[in-house]
Amino acid sequence: MKNVTDISMDDKIYKAIFKAAAEEALREEMAALPSDEELNEMYPRTKTLDKKVNAVLKQEFKTARRKQRLRLAARVAAVVILFVLVGGSVLMSVEASRNFILNTLIDRRGDYIAFDFGIDGTPNEAGNGIILGYLPEGLS
């Protein structure tokens, strides 16, 4: 049993040394790289490059905003449709509101002229329509 713990202890020591060596190598590599100021001196930026980079960034932001707005519009439309369906089903479940809705949809003429021929030539009782004095051929 002592051998098993020794092997695991050796692995722990190896991993710790390897980690320390990797960190030191990374630090040396980063120190060898030039700084931002040195890079700007070696490779100066041009206006055309700046314009191209800004155009690409602007296009990417536009695309991202368009996608975000499309998702928002889809969510809003889903909520509105859900609200209309639930509200419509609640309103249609009550007889009085169902009758009102159906009568409103069926009687779409509203305040417009209604041609009422009456029954046997007698005018309608409401008096809100134009009464023709004759029945056209084929309507009798």
Image: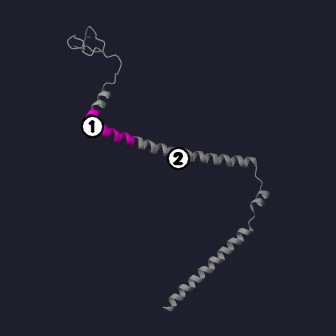
Q: Amino acid at mark 1?
A: Val
Residue 126 location in percent, x, y? 27, 16
Q: CA distance from mark 2 to mark 1?
A: 40 Å
Closer to the chain start, of discs 2 and 1, is: 2
Coloring basis for residues? one colour
Residue furthest right as drawn: 41
Residue matched to label 2: 68
Picture quarter containing residue 101? top left
As drawn, 137 above or below 80: above
Residue matched to label 1: 94
Picture quarter containing residue 83? top left
Tag 1 secondary structure: loop
Tag 2 secondary structure: helix
Q: Amino acid at mark 2?
A: Gln
Q: What are the residue bounds of the magenta stretch?
A: 81-98
- Name the side, left or right, on which 77 lies relative to 117: right
- Closest to the observer: 32 or 111? 111
Which residue is depicted at the point 37% across and 39% down? Answer: 84
Which residue is depicted at the point 57% across and 46% down? Answer: 63
Which residue is depicted at the point 78% across and 60% down? Answer: 38
- Closest to the observer: 100 or 115? 100
Picture quarter containing residue 7? bottom right
Residue 78 location in percent, x, y? 42, 43
